[in-house]
Image: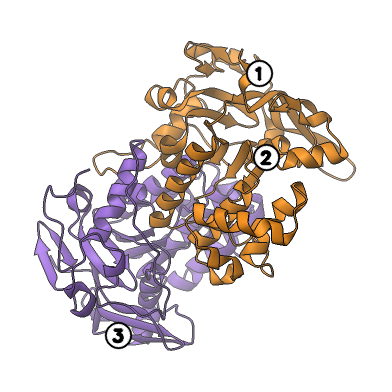
Chain colours: A purple, B orange
Amino acid sequence: MSALLEVRGLEVGIGGLPILRGVDMEVRPGEILGVVGETGAGKSMTARSVLDLLPAAATVDFASCTFAGQDFIPPKARQEARGHRIGFVPQRPRGSLNPVFRVGNQLSATLRRLRDMGRREAKDEALDLLRAVRITDPERVYRSFPHELSGGMCQRVCIAIALAGEPDLIIADEPTTGLDVTIQAEILRLLGDLITERHAAGMLITHDLGVVADVCDRVAVMYAGRVVNLGTTTEIYREALHPYANRLVSIATSLDSGGTPREIPGRVPNPGDELAACAFAPRCFRAGPGCFDVEPPRIDRDGQIAFCHHPVNAGEVPR
Amino acid sequence: MTAAADTLAIRDLTKVFRIRTRGFRHADLKAVDDVTLSIAPGRTLAVVGESGSGKTTLARLILRLLEPTEGTVLLEDADITAMEGAELEDVRGRMQIVFQDPYDSLSPWQTVGRTVAEPLLLHEDLTMKQASGRVAEMLERVGLSPEHARRYPHELSGGQAQRVGIARAMVTEPALVVLDEPTSSLDMSVQSQILLLLQSLQEEMDISYLFISHDLSVVRYIAHDLAVMYLGKVVESGPAAEIFASPRHPYTEALLRAAPRPDPSHKTDHVYLVGEQPSALDRAPGCPLYGRCPISEDVCADTPQELVDIGAQHRVACWKRT
């Protein structure tokens, strides 16, 4: 299947420090790709590179990048797609709405800019979008300021704004962090349903493996600026090839069942730290001598891709 | 009751905040409403609930960082709500807290050694020199090296900073430690390290934990007992394993159903409760969940629900489920 968004060899540096060190991933039409990893793994940076929303000091280099067949390397192509063909749902909904304007005005201003609508038409469409994100009293919300709305309600408004340009891809960066559990579940389901209904695709950035299991079709696991394991959610959760992904899933599942989690010793490297050929090697339970000096090879097995010298064999790691 | 043996026993604890609504008008917000709980030595009680449920206010009342409106807090059989002056200062060494954000809760211009020594200087009148041996020992117990004593917080990773926070809380060998979301700002791999550490310290030192969290998977692992709060009320309490296996209160059930689980074959249930949590100011006089509850009836609106024991210490405040 040809990819909607395909990123190859993405390298980003800030102030001379490597942040992304060759990211490969693709989002296929109709799917939701989960991007997981710990702080500094480069999840948000990957999304921001695609949207051309990186800090001015950043250097960006793609080996290749295409969106729906279009060359996405020129920054202008990425800027023009932002809002139109790619919608963005931010991590802090209230912080990304303007506090001094009513949310309805912010939504209709977006519609007038992205879709050349008149005032009246934009307002009608804005109310329709508020209904689409399952707000039961769109008229009241339309007239509200962000501080008058709950966090969950602000996130619905942000999702409506992301939908305004009728995007083919929605990128959501930790969209439910900071929301209460019951609201989080509603927002995730809403995002999933909207992406399906509108025949779009999604990229969901999160550190919560429960969230991924709930809504994602495939998952990319990132570590220290690279994708180390990529596969269908079912396969990754059943038996991830990469020891890092494998252990993360095992920690999450053992906590979930009340069991004692295994440890991953050490900590994630900071940008600028000296890295082994495989950045995870110093913390890895399977690491051998080659892991530190030789670039890990690409392994294709069971619907997964992993970059590892010693991938986990089926049934090998006791749960 | 075996209250005499409990590390912590709180009875009928209530905190009302008087808040200004508009102009000179005031309203009373019951942040914690008639809460009774206890923790035995070496046990962990987890308090779960969403934002606005009163769990942090409850922790502050227990540590007497806030004055309760009504009710008592007994720490090792001493009523700390009645204490003043030197007596209160002494008891503070017996109860400590670990905060959510490890960096924010460490002083940026104090070395780790000074930070960990401070409770000893305050509560045991030691000098820095006398304390240094215990500080070094404590740092090793939390998985750091004595050499970390000379470092400053900005030189530490998140996990190391949280270990310092834990060392500071444990150095006076307290009876009770309040853990206020101690792992929620940490990375996944570090989170499990900290949980394992907390558990081994509890076993070594026989400390009681009050563990505040909204993360049910962490709670499932660490808690012996569980109290679920909603709008200031405890709606369900009892042994954690029992509640996870058979939640009785509709709110507990909603929380468990909504929590995403790391299993692709399990889909969370997202429409169990109606709408969002209202402000505690607009609470119905009866059951706090009235209006959102899928099994509520008209009588729930004005009939207050008391916790009823349904066997094996499992208590539920819902007449339809008892």
Q: How many labels does the image show?
A: 3
- Which chain is disc 1 placed on? B
A81 sits to left or right of B75: left
Pointer 1 residue: B4
Q: Look at the image and tell me in which quarter the N terminus of chain B lies.
A: top right
User: Which of B165 and A212 lies nearest the eye of the viewer?
Assistant: B165
Q: How crowded is mark 2: few (under 14 residues within 10 Å), some or many (20 or more)?
A: many
User: Is the residue B20 above or below the residue B113 in the image?
Assistant: above
User: Is the residue B201 above or below the residue A273 in the image?
Assistant: above
- Which chain is disc 3 placed on? A
For marks 2 and 1, the one nearer the N-term is 1
User: Which of A96 and B68 lies nearest the eye of the viewer?
Assistant: B68
Instruction: Where is residue A298? Give x, y as percent.
Output: 14, 71
Secondary structure beneath dot 3 equals loop
Instruction: Where is residue B24? Give x, y as percent.
Output: 90, 42
Instruction: Give the quarter of the image for residue B48.
Output: top right
Residue type for callout 2: Met
Instruction: Give the quarter of the image for residue A34.
Output: bottom left
A208 sits to left or right of A143: left
Residue type for callout 1: Ala
Task: Using the numbered discs, state the Cα–Cα distance from disc 1 to disc 3 in whole angstroms.
Answer: 71 Å
Pointer 3 residue: A73
Instruction: Give the quarter of the image for residue A276.
Output: bottom left
Task: Using the numbered discs, state the Cα–Cα distance from disc 2 to disc 1 in whole angstroms.
Answer: 18 Å
Residue B105 in view in this figure: no
Q: How crowded is mark 1: few (under 14 residues within 10 Å), some or many (20 or more)?
A: few
Identity of the residue drawn at 58% across and 43% down: B179
A208 sits to left or right of A73: right
Residue type for callout 3: Ile
Q: How crowded is mark 3: few (under 14 residues within 10 Å), some or many (20 or more)?
A: some
Pointer 2 residue: B95
